[in-house]
Image (cartoon, rainbow, N blue to C red):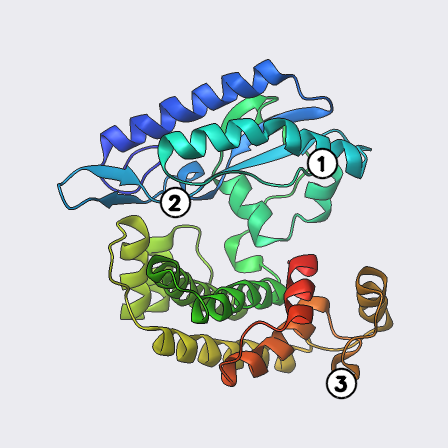
Amino acid sequence: MGRHVAGDAPEMDRLVEDSIRAIGAEIDAVRVPKLLGVVLGGGYGRGEGGVATMPGGSQRLSNDLDFYLVVEDGSSAAEMESASRALEPIARRWSERLGIDVDFCPPKTPWRIRHDQERLMIQELLHGYFDVAGEKGEVLFSGVERRQPSEFPWTEAVRLLVNRGAGLILARTSDDPQFVVRNVNKCVLGAGDALLIARGGYRWRAEERAKALGLPLYADAVAWKFRPRAEGVCGLEEAREIWLSATREVMEIGRRAGSAGRSLYQAARWIVRRRTLGELSTLGQGPVVRILQRMIGVIEARKPFPPSLEIDWKIFN
């Protein structure tokens, strides 16, 4: 296994290594105000990046390059947006050069990272990243507690199901076959990961999660993630049933544990961010729980994305 890609693909591993070092040099040259540092996360940051083999036998990268920006505490929303805009030309150039999406995630401050330290996204970033520009990760993430993979809160399972459910809804109305195949695969993986989180059995490595879950289709989806191909591991309808089954179990685990309860605090969070009460039947539940409850009905009925639900998902994602 290489530093960035899964399995034996040394040329692709070197391509990622050389590319992110060049991108880091370009970021340093821009001298973005308030920017403390940039790290590479995602699959290529933790050694689980995918490589696709083309019909002629050549290889290409298949996942996004996900860069995480950390800006100074106290940075305003305008300053964060300015930092993102300053790096857009770099993202565009390298997306065209590599044939994959090069993404600079919305900037976060050290305070926000510490505040969100229980999130799966933050903990997976801590578990596997690559220094790109500015301060190193050990400085950027100082004071952030590292959690055991079995310690993620139940709401992270809900958040995964919401994101994969959104992909499922969008795939149903897409005319792009590869978009559908990718989102079906993500759905299978996300449903399995959500079950492991809710059961307290999550693992850092995808192959370890496959062993812990013991579901052949999940193992197939992991293999597809590492070496994608034109055909998917299952169809859209089977992915829908997998998502619904996982959602029912996760929600039942939350109900038994009292995690899906209501509170004035959660009601206030929703009202402040959305400036509306939303559906009264779910008022007081956590925002991602409310979104999942509504998403279940949409996916059961095979409906397109209601505009208001899509807005809720983007705000609380």
**Image quarter for residue 252?**
bottom right
Q: Earlier in the sequence, mark 1 or mark 3?
A: 1
Closer mark to the observer between disc 2 and disc 1: 1
Q: Position of residue 275 (x, y in %)?
A: 85, 65
| Residue occupied by mark 2 | 63
Residue at 28% over, 56% down: 224
| Separation (CA) of disc 2 from disc 1 | 25 Å
| Residue occupied by mark 1 | 81
Disc 3 crowd rating (10 Å Cα; few below 14, some 14-19, many 20+) is: few
* The C terminus: image quadrant: bottom right
Closer mark to the observer between disc 1 and disc 3: 1
Label 3 sits on a secondary structure element that is helix
Amino acid on which the number 2 mark rests in the picture: Asn
| Residue occupied by mark 3 | 281
Asked if residue 311 is positioned above or below residue 106 in the image, the reply reads below
Instruction: Say whether residue 148 is left or right of residue 232.
Output: right
Label 1 sits on a secondary structure element that is helix
Instruction: Say whether residue 83 is left or right of residue 157.
Output: right
The answer to whether any part of residue 63 appears in the image is: yes
